Image (cartoon, coloured by chain):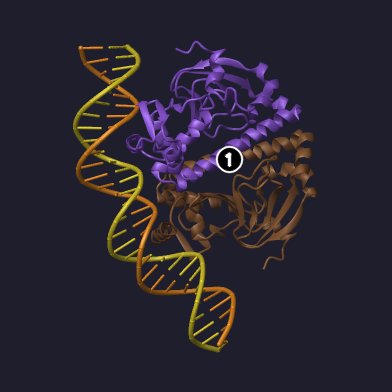
Chain colours: A brown, B purple, C orange, D yellow
Amino acid sequence: MLQMVGSGAAKGAVAGMAPTIEDGFAPIEPLGTNFRLDRDRALFREGDKAAFCYKIIAGAVRISKLTADGRRQIADFFLPGDLISFDLGGIHSCTAEAIVECVVRRYPKPQIERIAAESPRVARHMLALAQDRLASAQTQMMVLGRKTATERIATFLVAQAARADARGGRNLRLPMTRIDIADHLGLTVETVSRIFSRLKRDRVIDVPDAHNVVIRDWNQLEDRADM
Amino acid sequence: MLQMVGSGAAKGAVAGMAPTIEDGFAPIEPLGTNFRLDRDRALFREGDKAAFCYKIIAGAVRISKLTADGRRQIADFFLPGDLISFDLGGIHSCTAEAIVECVVRRYPKPQIERIAAESPRVARHMLALAQDRLASAQTQMMVLGRKTATERIATFLVAQAARADARGGRNLRLPMTRIDIADHLGLTVETVSRIFSRLKRDRVIDVPDAHNVVIRDWNQLEDRADM
DNA sequence: CGCCCTATTGAGATTCATCAACTGCGGTGG
DNA sequence: CCACCGCAGTTGATGAATCTCAATAGGGCG
C-alpha cells in the first residue's frame, strides 16, 4: 500500500474545494522534502526543539499530550493537506505521531523563518493558520468542558465529515482507533464504543467496519451534536 | 475605585519580569485609545466582525463560548498587559466580557494590518502571540479532557499564580466568580466550592474571601495538579 | 433595611469510568 | 494449512465521581 506519493496526495484533502489558507505558502513549497513515516512513529515529541514545519501528504497524524501518569489527550487529528508546526522557533508543545503509514513533507524552520521575515504575505498566512488552529482549539474546549458523551461523538463525526468530506457520499473514513477517539474526546474506549453502537441502533449511522462510518441521518446527527 | 489608569496599570501584570512577547508591539502603541468597560459588558461577541485589537490596561476579561442551550465554556481569562484579538481580519470566535470594571486600550484593525504588512517584526510578534495562545489552549484541553475535579482546580490555581504572581507573596487574587471558574474548568459551581473547601480544610490554601487565595503549601498544590 | 446574587453545604440522582468477559481479525509460526 | 496469539472492539455489571436539587448564609447596593 501507499505507492501514490506524487499524484494521489490531493485525493484525501479538500481536493476541488474552495482555496484554503495553505495556498499562500507557494514560496515555501520548493524547500520541502518528502519522507515516509511508519505507523505509530513520532514526527516530533512534546519538549523537542522545533526544527521543521510539516505538511501531511498522505496518511493521518495525531497531536497529543501526556500527563505524568500516562493519561493522554489528543488535541487534534491531521489529514493530507494539513500543515503542522507551521510557526516560528520554540519548543513543540505536543507530540505528533502517525496514525497510519504517512508521507510527510518537511520544511527547515530557519528557511521558513527567513521567508516569513521577507514576505509579509507568507507571514500573514502563517498567522491566519495559527488563528484557525486556535479557533478550533476553543471549539474543542467547549466539547470537552460542556458536552455529554453522545454530543461529543456526534460533534466529532460532524466535524470529521466536514473536513474529510467535500467528495460526495456520506461515507466517512476514520483512520484513528477508538482509543484515539476516546483520548480526543475525553472519554473511555468503552463509552465511545457504546455510543457508536447506540447511534447505529438508532439508524443515525452505519458502521460497516471500525474505520468507516456512513451517516444515514444527517439531521439527527447534528441535533445530537447540539452546538 | 479604579482611578489608577496610567501608573497602576502595570501592577497586576508581569511587572518586573522578563520581557514578554508584548514588548514587540511598540510601533502599534500610539494607535491605541483607552476606554472604560463596565463589569459584565462585552468587548465583542462571538460572530462579530473583528474591528479592533485590544489590550487590557486594568481589570480582567473572560473569553467564552455558549452552546445553543446556554451552557458556557470559558476558554481563558485575561489580566492587565494581556492582548486580545491580536490577529488579522475575520470573525471573533469567542465572546469577550469584563469580569470587573476594566480599562481597555483599543487599536483599529486596519491600521494594525498595515503595520503588520510593513513590519516583519510586528508580524512575527503577532504570530508568537498566537502560538502562545494555542499552546495554552492545548494545555487546557488536557485539563478538561483528562483531569479530575481536584486536579483541575489545583492546576488552575498554579497557573493563575504563575501568571499574576511575580510580585512576592503567595497571595493570589481571583477577580472571577466561582461560576466563572466552574465554566472555565468544565465543572459546576458546587463542585468548585466543595474543592476549595477541601483544599482549605487540608491546609493547602487559605481563602480569606471569595476573591483571594493564599497558597500555604505550594508542593501539595502542585502535587494535586498532577501534570 | 431588604433584596439579589454569590457562595457554601448536604442529600440523592445520573452519567460515565472501571472491571471483566467475549468476539473477530490479522499475523505468525508450527 | 491451520492453530495460536495479541490487539481492537464490543457488551455487561458495578461503582465512583460529579451533577442536580435544595436549603442556608453572607455581602454589596439601591
**Is A195 on the left-hand or right-hand side of A46?**
left
Q: Indicate whether B192 appears above or below A186.
A: above
Residue B55 lies in what quarter of the image? Answer: top right
- Front-most of C18 and A28? C18
Question: Which percent across, then down, holds residue B213?
Answer: 40, 28
Question: Which percent across, then down, holds residue B190?
Answer: 32, 36
Q: Indicate whether D13 appears above or below D24.
A: below
Circle 1 chain:
B
Residue at 67 percent across and 51 percent down: it is A81
Residue at 51 percent across and 25 percent down: it is B168
Question: Which percent across, then down, holds residue A137?
Answer: 54, 42
Which amino acid does the dot numbered 1 rest on?
Ala
Q: Kindly state the secondary structure of the residue where label 1 is placed.
A: helix
Q: Pointer 1: what residue?
A: B135
Residue D13 lies in what quarter of the image? Answer: bottom left
- Front-most of B39 and D4? D4
Residue B67 seen by the camera:
no
Q: Indicate whether B22 appears above or below A67.
A: above
User: Which quarter of the figure is the C terminus of chain A placed in?
Assistant: top left
Q: How many labels does the image show?
A: 1
User: Which quarter of the figure is the N terminus of chain A placed in?
Assistant: bottom right
